[in-house]
Image (cartoon, rainbow, N blue to C red):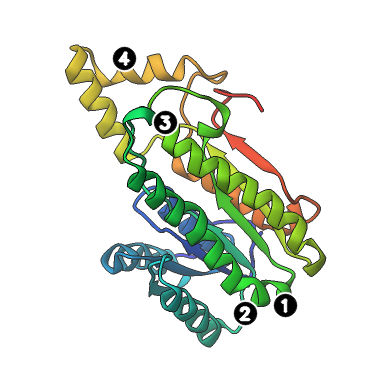
């Protein structure tokens, strides 16, 4: 079993990742472990967490699986206590959990869908941050919230998603100010399209609908970016690792766009 490659940016640190899925969440866990971190994996689906943990272990990393629903106060408290019991400290908290958007115009969006999105993306994230604040203060730690390029545009059908992610951004900025005197940094990463399995499937569906190839859909989409390509999950994860690491020790309250130049802040 070979050791994970990396430069040790997060050597011996404990990184908690909330909202671990098969795409970006997985990449954040693997990249953090590759940089020397011990990783705590949190999400509702235990089987998915175990799959990612197995990948971390196979590459020589150390992880802890804690099934967690961030809308449940007791579950979040258990995440904190399990992490401290296993590793004794917390250095980085990455919040990647969010509710799927309705993808309907706001005039046809069910209010319950907007409320649910806010409950997970904003209130759930705040619940996790509050629960970990004391531990992060003890280590002068870092928080990275995963946002979205949706905060940079007002395209149709993204309204409910933009409401939630804009609120997450405002909350992140306020927390950077409120937690700064505790030595805790709070930053955000805003990805654009992420070239993962889910997007590949989606482009395939679009291709079928319009009678073109998936490659043509990719090229048309990527043509809007400066680099004429779409970022991959590991590239987003690298930005997260940078903001979490000592290399960004003087950066807080910042939002780092990772979209190959599709939008400029």
23 up-or-down from 80: above or below: above
| Horizontal and vertical percent position of residue 136 | 67, 72
Find numbered disc 1 in the image and state the secondary structure of the residue it sits on.
helix
The mark found on residue 216 in the picture is 4
Which one is in front in this view, the residue at disc 2 or the one at disc 1?
1
Quarter of the figure with the C terminus = top right
Q: Which residue is mark 3?
A: 158
| Horizontal and vertical percent position of residue 54 | 34, 67
Which one is in front in this view, the residue at disc 2 or the one at disc 4?
2
- Residue at x 43%, y 65% (from the top left corner): 70
Query: Camera-side residue: 260 or 105?
Result: 105
Query: Camera-side residue: 239 or 168?
Result: 168
Find numbered disc 4 in the image and state the secondary structure of the residue it sits on.
helix
The mark found on residue 138 in the picture is 1
Which one is in front in this view, the residue at disc 4 or the one at disc 3?
3
The mark found on residue 89 in the picture is 2
Q: Residues within 10 Å of mark 2 (few under 14, many from 20)?
A: some
Q: CA distance from mark 1 to mark 4?
A: 51 Å
Q: CA distance from mark 2 to mark 3?
A: 38 Å
- Residue at x 61%, y 45% (from the top left corner): 169
Which one is in front in this view, the residue at disc 1 or the one at disc 3?
3
Label 2 close to label 3 by CB (< 8 Å)? no
- Residue at x 36%, y 39% (from the top left corner): 196
| Horizontal and vertical percent position of residue 240 | 59, 50
Q: CA distance from mark 2 to mark 4?
A: 48 Å
């Amino acid at each position: 079993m070979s050791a994970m490659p990396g430069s040790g940016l997060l050597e011996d640190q404990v990184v908690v990742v909330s909202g671990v899925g098969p795409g970006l969440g997985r990449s954040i866990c693997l990249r953090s472990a590759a940089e020397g971190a011990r990783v705590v994996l949190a999400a509702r689906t235990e089987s998915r967490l175990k799959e990612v943990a197995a990948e971390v272990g196979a590459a020589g990393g150390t992880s802890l699986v804690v099934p967690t629903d961030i809308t449940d106060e007791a579950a979040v408290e258990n995440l904190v206590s399990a992490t401290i019991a296993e590793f004794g400290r917390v250095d980085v908290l990455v919040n990647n959990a969010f509710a799927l958007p309705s993808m309907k115009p706001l005039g046809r969006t069910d209010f319950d869908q907007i409320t649910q999105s806010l409950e997970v993306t904003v209130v759930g994230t705040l619940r996790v941050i509050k629960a970990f604040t004391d531990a992060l203060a003890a280590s002068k730690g870092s928080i990275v919230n995963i946002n979205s390029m949706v905060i940079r545009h007002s395209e149709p059908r993204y309204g409910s998603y933009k409401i939630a992610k804009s609120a997450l951004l405002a909350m992140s900025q306020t927390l950077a100010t409120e937690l700064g005197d505790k030595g805790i940094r709070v930053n955000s990463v805003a990805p654009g399209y992420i070239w993962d399995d889910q997007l590949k499937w989606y482009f395939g569906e679009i291709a079928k609908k319009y009678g073109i190839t998936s490659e043509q859909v990719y090229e048309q989409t990527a043509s809007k970016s400066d680099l004429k390509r779409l970022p991959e999950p590991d590239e987003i994860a690298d930005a997260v690792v940078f903001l979490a690491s000592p290399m960004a020790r003087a950066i807080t309250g910042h939002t780092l766009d990772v979209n190959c130049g599709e939008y400029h802040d």
